[in-house]
Amino acid sequence: MKQKFITRHSGNRRLILIFLGWGMTDAVLNSVERLDGYDIMAVWDYRDESFDAEIINSYREIFVFAWSFGVFMAARTLARNRSLPVALKVAINGTLNPVHDTLGIPSAIFHGTLAGLNERSLAKFYRRMCSDISQFNEFKGNYPERDIDGLKDELTAIERYAADGSPLDTSWHRVIIAADDRIFPPENMAKAWEHTPRTSKIAGGHLPQWQKILESEIINKKAVGEKFESSASTYDENAIVQNRIAATLWKLWRENMTSQPCSILEIGAGTGMLTREYAPVLTDADITTWDLTNAIRPLPTGKAVTGDAEELVYDALPDSFDTIVSASTFQWFNSLPMFLNNASRIMRRGGILAFSTFGHDNMKELSAITGSSLRYFSKQELCDMIPEGFEICEAIEERITMHFNSPRDILVHLRDTGVNGVYTPSNNLARIMHEYPRHDEGCPLTYHPIYIIARKK
């Protein structure tokens, strides 16, 4: 394999690792822009399986994106390097069965491609890989320079790997299938991933729109902080549901509290909705708050730290807190399971983990129109993320529906609560105004909070 850093900055602790498809080079990623806080590495050319894990094992979190035959090769590579701190694995237009009549590329097509490979047939393959002439013209500007004999050897090697029965990493977090893929049959991909719950079908062909996919799968924490900072003056007045959620979380936490906590860590304190619930009661506790921005500090209570909680948790000392709480924040995390495992390390035995986040139906009216949504989890998925050594005391969900006079009022509400950047990209505004559902009570907006209370044994 070949590995190359596409972007690299000495201070970054997170890596985006992209396993490219057959016939590619890193040139296909030339148009990908730098993502704040992330290095990017490309992997391609699977004639051999050499992979240097040493050059990436210093990263705290690795986000794997694998495309086409790169899905299979990533699964083999990750199975051999399980110590890598992989936070997210996304499979794009590929399967774990690269040559298969019902779960991958049909054998006849694969062998026909191999037998007839020449410069002309390769050009046709690249054209079929693209969704339209515009994407093909862009691709030609970043054309991979590969020789035909080397490409034949790569196909032969992939078929040999597929037959050898080596272990694969099968625990993929997300699967993306392009509806108009003319390389991997979409129906074969759907069957191959039918037991993977987080599978989505998108418009387009085999070649991914890399920038769009990366930005949709990795949350830009800087942008999130800026959105909430800009809405600080209007948040409390408009975040009616979030206020109710904070009150409910405090009630459940209090009911499961066996003793007064000495040290509390609140994550995503924001304007202090949750803090104002518990701080007047737990007056003897040392309170630490972590938040992306320092512009919306809740109360002059305890220690306020500005930063990304998914980063800050690595630097916190073991057994630092006997309580960790968070209201309406964890949906913004890139790897909640990894964070919860890290949070377990900094919690004392007997301590309480109390948090609320949102489920699949959250703002379902908007996501049905825009196709944009955060990565929400079910109640059971959240319970399954709770680390070993914890007892789940409460796991509750509810659905709260607000009604507005018009879609425009909903957009104003989202702006004033700081989440408009996710749900209302500018190219969807007209569709939202035209297609948004209207009922006798008005235009509905659904919130789907989930509450988890767990105690460390």
Image (tube, rainbow, N blue to C red):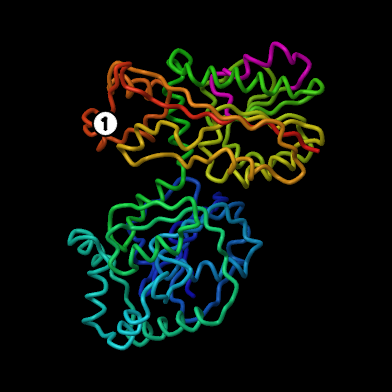
Viewer-closest of 437 and 325 = 437
Residue beneath the point at 41% across and 51% down: 214
Residue lying at 48% horizontally and 68% vertically, measured from the top left: 96
- Pick the residue in front: 190 or 322: 190
The magenta stretch spans residue 335: no
User: Can residue 83 be seen here?
Assistant: yes
Rendering quarter of residue 62: bottom right
Which one is in front, 312 or 360? Answer: 360
Q: Which residue bears the numbered disc 1?
A: 432
Q: Is residue 206 left or right of residue 7?
A: left
**Magenta span main SS:** loop
Instruction: Name the residue nearer the viewer: 76 or 198.
Output: 198
Give the extent of the magenta segment: 268-286
Which amino acid type is marked by label 1?
Ile
Residue 229 spot, x, y in % from top left? 46, 25
Instruction: Indicate whether 102 appears above or below 345.
Output: below
Q: Is residue 371 above or below residue 433?
A: below
| Quadrant assignment for the C terminus | top right
Task: Indicate the position of residue 149 as horizontal and vertical percent values.
Answer: 35, 88
SS type, badge 1 = helix
Residue 290 showing in the rendered view: no
Classify 10 Å Cα crowding around label 1: few (below 14), some (14-19), many (20 and above).
many
